[in-house]
Image (cartoon, rainbow, N blue to C red):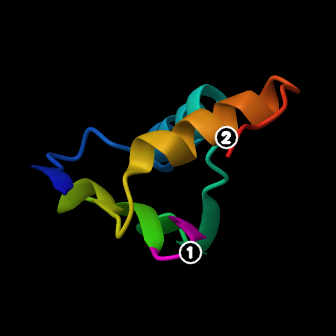
Amino acid sequence: MTLSAADDGSWAQADVDALVQALNADYGIELVPVVANGTVSLYAFQRNCNEITVTWTAGVSVSLTFQASTPLLPLLQEAQAAMAGEEVQP
């Protein structure tokens, strides 16, 4: 699933960083920078065959992509439980 929007120039690197930080804080997803040069940013999280990416090209587009071979909800619940210091049930 990909959520994408045209960037009318209103997005800045700080906005992309805030989105990534929110995903990290709210869901425990550790999105790491692959490319971040002020014009193009790509952040990615990979686990098993699941991938989440945030991509921004200044003045062109912003997208959030989820690719999963397994349901993402259990992964998100596991990450949230781990962040809260709770024992993760299989």
Horizontal relation, residue 7 to residue 78: left or right: left
Q: Position of residue 47 (x, y in %)?
A: 59, 69
- Name the residue rendered at 46%, 38% in the picture: 15
Instruction: Depth check: give the residue in front, 68 or 38.
Output: 68
Q: Position of residue 41 (x, y in %)?
A: 46, 66
Q: Position of residue 83 (x, y in %)?
A: 79, 31
The stretch in magenta equals: 44-49
| Mark carried by residue 48 | 1
Question: Looking at the image, is mark 2 or mark 1 earlier in the sequence?
Answer: 1
Q: Is residue 48 above or below residue 9?
A: below
- Name the residue rendered at 39%, 62% in the picture: 70
Residue 57 in view here: no
Horizontal relation, residue 86 to residue 47: left or right: right
Quarter of the rendering containing residue 18:
top right
Q: Position of residue 8 (x, y in %)?
A: 14, 46
Dot 2: few (<14), some (14–19), or many (≥20) neighbours within 10 Å?
A: many
- Name the residue rendered at 88%, 27% in the picture: 85
For the stretch drawn in magenta, what is the main secondary structure? strand
- Name the residue rendered at 26%, 38% in the picture: 10
What's the residue type where badge 2 is placed?
Answer: Ala
Q: Are marks 2 and 1 in contact (CB under 8 Å)?
A: no
Dot 1: few (<14), some (14–19), or many (≥20) neighbours within 10 Å?
A: few
What's the residue type where badge 1 is placed?
Answer: Asn
Horizontal relation, residue 67 to residue 39: left or right: left
Quarter of the rendering containing residue 88:
top right
Q: Secondary structure at mark 1?
A: loop
Rendered-image quadrant of the N terminus? bottom left
Q: Secondary structure at mark 2?
A: helix
The residue beneath circle 2 is 79
Horizontal relation, residue 17 to residue 15: left or right: right
